[in-house]
Image (tube, coloured by chain):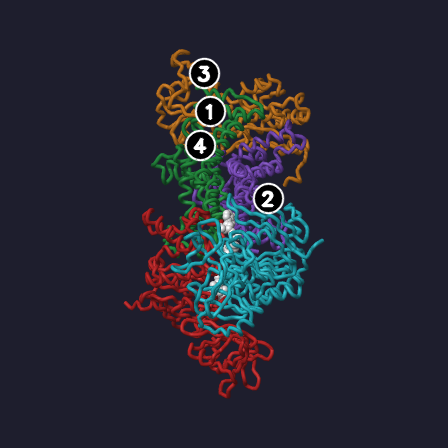
Chain colours: A orange, B red, C green, D purple, E cyan
């Protein structure tokens, strides 16, 4: 119960995809013992996570939305942003693939094919990391099908926004036989339930980097900054990085260790 | 179809839990009459009226209504209830206006609004509450409220009207006018009326027939002279001691607390005591003299008030006066123990 | 793709009320649509739930049958049905593999109505039971003796207990109007189609737009207040 | 740290009930803890809300004061408070910048209790109003004439209307027991500390473990049933 | 402190909406007596009892209780209510057992459970319901229920007991025993009793003082001979026509529907008609003769029933008999128009 655990607590938020993977449940107990701290993990979307951090209600965030992260740090809310791991996104869709996208297509090209054929596409539309990534792909120029001019906007009856988490989005896409962008972890978690298949993967633009950011102790002195630094260092230690790389669920690797160059 | 009788009850019993509160081997009620039921509190009068108005089934036994056995199936009851209306002892007015209360049953019949309005106003006039139509029912005095309940039943023009103490809480003037209304609907429209009352004078004034209920049983005597007490026995003689020294000898087998009734017609009045087989001989002054239909009702204070009926001829013969001492004589076997 | 209000309002907590009023006054088409969907779906589901719940409540509350106490306890228990569970349950029925998959109802307002109906019915039924259980037995007897048939007895009882039964319906409406799980799972929060106030609130909350979410919550309360006023006017007639 | 049950049970929809029973019988410590947290938090918040809501309901339901109708409408409106909005509202109070920030209550069971208290109080109050509003005026008068003071009159009224008031409390309990938004925002669904049945259901749903979510929903209903039975026993005494 | 009077009402009015239902310029009620209030339905009896038992404040005017003005502030009322208990006309029993109902007030006083038990059982014995202690109150007959309400008030041992039609619905035996109980607590414990009834005989049997309420006003006459009708005028003479040919001349100014009361003490009986200034001269047979305290009450059927009081001496002198024709004479000004 509550009583036999340390009363000092560190509050971090993480995205639902990380929480659902169960990775932190495997990693954190060792850290908790080491520093005699209880780590409370609160799973929320990237937007909400950053908001809670801005209000000083948590000590650190683990998120995956580089543009928002940069802004968060630039605005002085966070410090010590470190890349800890990554996975990647897939474009999935109905097996009959009406847009005829190919596995090796660059992501922007695949999206444009969907737009052109007005095939149903389901967006999370929730300003989450995944949604940020999707928007950046819509904005990028396709390489093989015309240039900037030919780029179509995601607008119209074929483009639906559901404003929900990844799992719910997958379920809706599946029911509607729509294309959508999905992260590796969630896709494998739902794979058994889905009729949708991976149609495009591997593009550099589909990479999904996760970072940890400490809340700026200059703003909120009550923040347990030292422990956050300890946690960050601990996560980046070779032993833990190795564990991250080896963590599997249902026979699938979910995360790649951090790219040291990014840090 | 034999419709001389509206109701024929055979072996009807009603019990709550183990307690038997009604036990009526045989009861026939004539149609077109005013029948009055009297009896002490808890005798089962309300319970019987609930059965007669088909609000509750008997626990066992058969009820025939207008010669037809009542099956206590839903449709059957709905039809019969259309013909019988009950004004409950502890009546209930719906939380709306007086008008809507009186109109209630007429509306359920689906009558035309103008006809309803007419009937309601006639009904309210009968109970002298014409000005009260728009008043919320919750704002009436006790007697006014009771009269609204009566009007509500009267406008239904049922074949049988059951009234449970219809004039309790009602003032003397209106009591009289309600009695007149009851008489009138009975005579002009042939409505059979079955009602209860604790006012014996009212019972005699109104009733074509009076019957008494004591401990759930019908007794044929009137309800004058009902006494209760512990049955005692001395020298093989059984008696009730109503007051110290005032004994009434009875012919009862089961000991314990009992009710007794003395039929006022079986009491013999005389100026002198006379020798006879009758064991009960009581003397006292006359406290009340009144006409009761063709008879004269005389109340004598023998320690308790004892009522006797005599004919007008006997009254003249005996020349009885208020305050005079007189002797009442009656036999043990004429004391009824229900 | 403009969402002028939803995007631009950034406010501090205490000005949430003002922005809520602004939203209503401004009649921003997106907000209007969201509110309209909420009201429409909730009213329809409450209406259906009333048609089912009040008769059930009357039946259980007024009749003495064996197992009645059990039925009452079950009704009370159903009050605790979490919306997510109802959502999932109906989802299974409506999904393409489900029994009613052929109707293609998932992610439509009809699906939301079905789910909310399941939510509101036990509430209305259980509170109707509470309303009529202690009713003066003379109401029924008086109605019967004045020639009312079973149906008419029921309407009389409803009329006598109108305040408590309307309170039951209000509680049902409020519950579905404020619920979120069913709308999310069965409606899918699809913009312009099934996005209602509560899913919009959750959506804004997820984005970290807490103040906007609270402002939307106030809009919801203002609408609920309006519906309540309306019900009260009906009730007084 | 294994979650044998949460992870391993994978079932089809119709076996959800069986797994729910299995969960209960197996007494898996994690499930037990989740249920315990749900029960504890909900009971405390319902108790507090009863202490506040019943007196408020009696006051509004029994007294005739100007503005009474408005207060009643407001109470009814508050029934439509979405849990997310309550969650956010209390979040602002408890957040480190908030008025009660110093108590560091965010993401604790106490925070959940506070939020659920806000949710349940208007429910209990509004239904208490409905329960006592139509009360026979003779109850009050009889109590007064037998020498009861104001407080004793109130307890007499509560005793007369006990069924309807207990129904109000049950409705309040059911609402908080099944609610999710407050627990999520204020509790944070922290495993072992603030993860209760509904946030666990949402968590499993998010992972796509629908059957497990439904099974947890059934567990929730079974517990609610038990609590209801218990209340019924108390009521009968 | 002047406690000769329990109540002194000055200029007390009570109105609902615009309607004035009570208008009492001055009323003093002596302590230690049984005071009986009579009057037609809607006269305001219940409204007055509600004021006397501090359940409702008057709309205007002052009430003094035991010489102290009542302020109608909460504390003040709570204290006074402890001393006054009312049994409502339409009484209410809490939905629990008979025992708990009777124990209610005692428990609120915080008495010891054993004492409560004792008192409750004594109270139930007084109304003859000792066996009913464990019965749910909902399962009583009308009269039983009323008697429980009486017992519940009696056990409170208040200084003032207000009873609103305490014997309506109660059978004759128990009526008598309840009257005895009322007399007894009045005599042995000095409890002041204020009660209403529609039974004038009961009023005469029980009351130390009887006063009447008509249209919200106290009238000093008794409630015998109350008639109502439309005031008419012919040749400057104002009269009420009770039946065709049966006119009662009155001295009233305002036309329209009115109530009138004829004080039975002001009616002169004679065998022959005699010439006098009295305008009302009516003849009919005697239908009832009874003792009423020291007086004799005689009812004459003159088309309606008219009641007169005479002394025993006059009775003997006139030698009146049941059925005899006799003439009643009274003056216009002795017809009271409240
Ligand atoms: N629901 C019930 N359960 C158990 N006993 C009951 C119930 N209703 C009535 N009784 C009992 O049945 C008996 C007969 O009751 P009923 O109401 O018929 O009497 P009554 O003759 O109408 O008396 P009253 O003159 O007081 O109205 C009473 O002793 C009463 O206590
Ligand atoms: N709440 C109310 N609002 C308006 N009028 C009322 C209200 N209560 C009573 N009345 C009216 O006040 C008058 C007096 O009522 P009250 O109950 O005192 O009469 P009462 O003398 O007790 O008559 P009864 O013999 O019928 O019991 C009646 O005409 C009644 O209609
Ligand atoms: Mg009765
Ligand atoms: Mg009265």
Residue E162: image quadrant is bottom right
C-alpha span from label 1 to label 2? 46 Å
Q: Nearer the viewer, residue D225 or B247?
A: B247
Q: Nearer the viewer, mark 3 or mark 2?
A: 2
Residue D55: numbered disc: 2
The residue labelled by disc 3 is: A139
Q: Are marks 4 and 3 on the same chain?
A: no
Q: Nearer the viewer, mark 4 or mark 3?
A: 4
Of all chains, the one bearing label 3 is A
Residue at far right of view: E1
Which numbered disc flags the more N-terminal residue, 1 or 3?
A: 1
When the figure is inspected, residue E143 is found, relative to residue D227, above or below; the finding is below
C-alpha span from label 1 to label 4? 20 Å
Residue A125: numbered disc: 1
Please report the residue visible at 59 percent of the width from the left and 67 percent of the height from the top.
Answer: E180
Residue B46 can be seen in this image: no
Element type at marker 4?
helix
The residue labelled by disc 4 is: C38
Residue B247 can be seen in this image: yes
């Amino acid at each position: 119960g509550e009583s036999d655990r340390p009363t000092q607590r560190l509050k971090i938020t993480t995205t639902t995809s990380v929480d659902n993977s169960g990775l932190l449940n495997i990693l954190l107990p060792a850290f908790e013992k080491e520093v005699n701290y209880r780590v409370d993990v609160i799973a929320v979307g990237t937007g909400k996570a950053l908001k809670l951090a801005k209000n000083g209600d948590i000590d650190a965030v683990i998120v995956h939305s580089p543009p928002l992260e940069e802004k968060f740090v630039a605005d002085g809310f966070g410090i010590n942003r470190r890349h800890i791991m990554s996975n990647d996104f897939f474009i999935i869709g109905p097996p009959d693939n009406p847009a005829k996208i190919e596995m090796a297509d660059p992501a922007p090209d695949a999206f444009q094919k969907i737009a052109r054929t007005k095939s149903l596409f389901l967006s999370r539309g929730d300003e989450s990391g995944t949604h940020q990534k999707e928007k950046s792909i819509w904005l990028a120029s396709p390489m093989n099908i015309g240039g900037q001019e030919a780029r179509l906007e995601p607008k119209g009856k074929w483009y639906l926004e559901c404003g929900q988490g990844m799992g719910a989005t997958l379920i809706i896409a599946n029911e509607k036989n729509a294309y959508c962008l999905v992260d590796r972890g969630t896709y494998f978690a739902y794979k058994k339930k889905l009729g949708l298949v991976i149609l495009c993967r591997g593009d550099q633009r589909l990479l999904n980097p996760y970072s940890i950011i400490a809340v700026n102790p200059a703003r909120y002195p009550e923040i347990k900054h030292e422990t956050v630094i300890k946690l960050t260092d601990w996560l980046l230690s070779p032993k833990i990085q190795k564990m991250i790389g080896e963590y599997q669920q249902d026979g699938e690797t979910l995360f790649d260790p951090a790219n040291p160059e990014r840090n | 179809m034999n419709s001389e009788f509206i109701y024929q009850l055979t072996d009807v019993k009603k019990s709550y839990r183990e307690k038997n509160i009604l036990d009526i081997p045989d009861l026939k009620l004539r149609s077109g009459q005013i029948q009055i039921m009297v009896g002490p509190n808890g005798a089962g009068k309300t319970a019987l009226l609930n059965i007669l108005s088909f609000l509750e089934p008997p626990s066992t036994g058969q009820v025939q209504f207008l010669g037809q056995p009542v099956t206590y199936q839903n449709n059957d009851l709905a039809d019969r209830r259309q013909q019988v209306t009950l004004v409950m002892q502890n009546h209930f007015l719906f939380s709306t206006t007086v008008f809507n209360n009186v109109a209630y049953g007429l509306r359920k019949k689906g009558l035309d609004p103008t006809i309803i309005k007419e009937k309601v106003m006639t009904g309210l006039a009968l109970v002298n509450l014409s000005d009260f139509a728009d008043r919320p029912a919750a704002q009436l005095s006790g007697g006014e409220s009771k009269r609204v309940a009566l009007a509500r039943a009267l406008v239904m023009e049922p074949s049988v009207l059951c009234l449970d103490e219809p004039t309790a809480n009602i003032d003397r003037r209106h009591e009289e006018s309600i009695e007149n209304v009851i008489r009138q609907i009975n005579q002009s429209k042939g409505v059979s009326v079955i009602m209860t009352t604790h006012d014996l004078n009212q019972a005699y004034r109104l009733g074509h027939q009076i019957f008494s209920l004591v401990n759930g049983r019908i007794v044929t005597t009137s309800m004058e002279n009902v006494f209760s007490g512990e049955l005692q026995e001395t020298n093989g003689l059984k008696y009730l001691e109503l007051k110290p020294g005032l004994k009434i000898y009875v012919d009862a087998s089961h000991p314990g607390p009992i009710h007794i009734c003395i039929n006022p017609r079986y009491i013999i009045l005389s100026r002198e005591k006379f020798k006879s087989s009758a064991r009960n001989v009581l003397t006292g002054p006359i406290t009340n003299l009144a006409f009761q239909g063709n008879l004269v009702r005389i109340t004598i204070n023998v320690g308790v008030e004892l009522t006797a009926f005599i004919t007008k001829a006997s009254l003249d013969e005996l020349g009885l006066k208020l305050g005079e001492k007189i002797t009442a004589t009656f036999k043990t076997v004429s004391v009824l123990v229900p | 793709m403009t969402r002028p209000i939803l995007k631009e309002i950034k406010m501090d907590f205490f000005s949430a009320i003002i922005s809520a009023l602004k939203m209503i006054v401004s009649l921003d088409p997106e907000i209007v649509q969201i509110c309209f969907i909420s009201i429409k779906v909730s009213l329809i589901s409450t209406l259906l739930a009333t048609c089912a719940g009040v008769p059930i409540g009357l039946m259980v509350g007024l009749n003495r049958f064996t197992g009645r106490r059990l039925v009452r306890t079950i009704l009370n228990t159903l009050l605790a049905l979490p919306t997510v569970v109802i959502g999932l349950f109906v989802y299974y029925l409506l999904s393409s593999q489900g029994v009613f998959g052929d109707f293609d109802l998932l992610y439509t307002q009809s699906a939301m109505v079905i789910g909310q109906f399941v939510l509101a019915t036990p509430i209305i039924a259980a509170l109707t039971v509470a309303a009529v259980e202690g009713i003066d037995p003379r109401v029924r007897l008086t109605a019967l003796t004045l020639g009312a048939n079973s149906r008419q007895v029921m309407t009389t009882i409803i009329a006598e207990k109108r305040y408590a039964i309307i309170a039951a319906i209000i509680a049902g409406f409020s519950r579905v109007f404020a619920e979120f799980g069913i709308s999310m799972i069965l409606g899918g929060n699809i913009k312009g189609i099934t996005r209602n106030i509560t899913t919009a609130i959750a959506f804004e909350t997820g984005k970290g737009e807490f103040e906007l979410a609270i402002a939307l919550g106030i809009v919801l309360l203002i609408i609920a207040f309006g519906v309540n006023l309306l019900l009260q006017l009906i009730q007084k007639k």
